[in-house]
Amino acid sequence: MDKDIRWKQRFANFKKATAQLTEFIQKGELNKFEVQGLIQCFEYTFELAWKTMKDYLELEGFNVKSPRATIKTAFQIELIDDGHAWIDALEKRNLMAHTYDEKRAMEAEKLIREKYYHIILKLRQKLEDLL
């Protein structure tokens, strides 16, 4: 019963974070400080995303320990449909940490807007459907 409650609580937080990320995306052009905020918002939204997946998978009887294992298992059971994009986002976390480098921050913003935001929304909808 605790696992059922935990994934639902985590999912509620994931939805709130996704709403904040959506506000950044809909804002359009951002100044350099807003870009840093967008990147940070994506980082904690991504963190909540994989942890929500992990909680759900554990509820379903899977034993996953790491973000990579969580993503692979989620892809195998079709919780997510673009495993490569999720793994790419996981690996790009190092890029995200360097927002003081304007070129890297711009690259991160582009990836978030064009690739990662969409996989976050798809996961949110899939989990909403499962709820």
Image: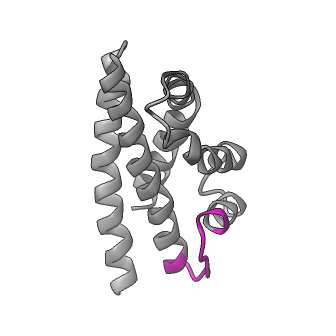
Which residue corresponds to the image point at 37% horizontal and 31% vertical from the top-left?
36
**Outermost bottom residue:** 1
Horizontal and vertical percent position of residue 43? 43, 47
Q: Quadrant of residue 73?
A: bottom right
- Rendering coords of residue 52 (x, y %): 44, 63
7 or 40: nearer the viewer: 40
Q: Quadrant of the C terminus?
A: bottom left
Q: How is the model colour-coded?
A: one colour
Say above or below: 29 vs 69.
above
Seen at 58% across and 83% down, the residue is 61
Residue plotted at (41% across, 57% down): 48
Residue that extends furthest to the top in the rendered view of this protein: 29
Q: Is residue 60 above or below residue 21?
A: below
111 sits to left or right of 56: right
Place of residue 40 in the rendered image (x, y in percent of width and height, measured from the top left)? 38, 41
Q: Is residue 105 above or below residue 62?
A: above
Magenta-drawn stretch contains 111: no
Identify the image quadrant of the N terminus. bottom left
Give the residue displayed 39% in from the left and 81% down from the top. Answer: 3
* Foreground residue among 96 and 46: 96
Q: Is residue 64 magenta?
A: yes
On screen, 68 above or below 45?
A: below
Tell me: 18 left or right of 97: left
Q: Position of residue 39 (x, y in %)?
A: 42, 36
How many numbered callouts? 0
Magenta-highlighted residues: 58-69
> Is residue 20 found left or right of 82 in the rendered image?
left
